[in-house]
Amino acid sequence: MLKKIWVSFVAVLFCVSFLYAGKTYVIDTPATGILSYGSYSADFRCFSRGNVISEINFGVFKPLDLGVSWELDRFIGYENIKAAVPSLHVKLRLYGGSMTLPGFALGYDGQGTFINGDYDGGYAQRGKGAYFVVGREFFIEGLIFNLGINVNDFSSPKVYWFSNATAPLYKEFVSFMLEYDNVNYFPEARLNCGLRFSVTEYLDIDCVVRDCWGKKDAERIPNERMLKISYLGKF
């Protein structure tokens, strides 16, 4: 098992060394970036069972983002809609990075997903919880890699770690995203990938496949397709 974990981690490091990581989040994992002061983002994420997560974040200060998200179960379809309790997101970038030192940020994100099983007041897949992430530019302009740790259950704490990256495929219009979540707990590890289409300077559309290596069970759906629409605005 330990050998599998290290082989997977080395493979991810090899892949992401050629990638570029950008915005505040890649797919399920955060990057070091934050919103600029006086701006906001509105995101809508559609995934399994007709579920939708809507999220809005604000750049309230130069190094600080605040936001809230809300999940509606079976919003798309014919079944009764069930609403989760809204979740808080806060992110503080402690250092923006330089040519020699990485940038780093810490935050909290309580938004999980309950894509499997009946809703019982919790999430089948927990959110990131409290996290710390570092990232920096490598070799050429725009070549950035992010690596982080998180704790999402404070009643029985377990430290996870993750890596992510985003590579431009066609100028600033199309990007490839890759991330490896829950790396150090191989049965719970998820490899996610996708394409980000920047329709305009303010509008992104992400087409994602989550859990590419997973096996279907009560807690996960392998090769889950997801669509996310993100809008960036300024006050």
Image (cartoon, rainbow, N blue to C red):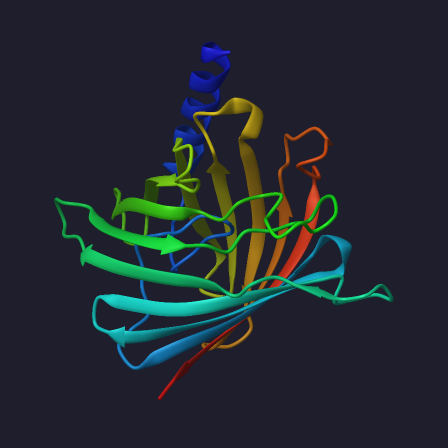
Tell me where residue 18 appears, x and y as whole percent: 39, 39
| Extreme residue toward the right, this view | 78
Q: Position of residue 60 (x, y in %)?
A: 28, 76
Can residue 144 be seen here?
A: no
Image height of 26 relative to 204, above or below: above
Please name the residue shown 58% across and 54% down the image: 195
The residue at 41%/29% (across/down) is 14
Q: Quadrant of residue 233?
A: bottom left
Q: Check the picture and name the quadrant holding the C terminus.
A: bottom left
Judge by depth and name the residue closer to the eye, 63 or 22. Answer: 63
Q: Going 67% across and 37% down the picture, which residue do you hit?
A: 220
In the rendered image, residue 88, in percent from the top left (x then y), is placed at 42, 63
Viewer-closest of 138 and 216: 216
87 vs 13, nearest the viewer: 87
**Image side of residue 141 versus residue 19, left or right:** left
Q: State how many labels appear.
A: 0
Which image quadrant is residue 93 in?
A: bottom left
- Residue sitting at 66 percent across and 36 percent down? 219
Residue 154, visible in the rendered structure: yes
Q: Residue furthest bottom?
A: 235
Task: Estimate the x, y position of residue 7 in percent, counting from the top left.
Answer: 46, 17
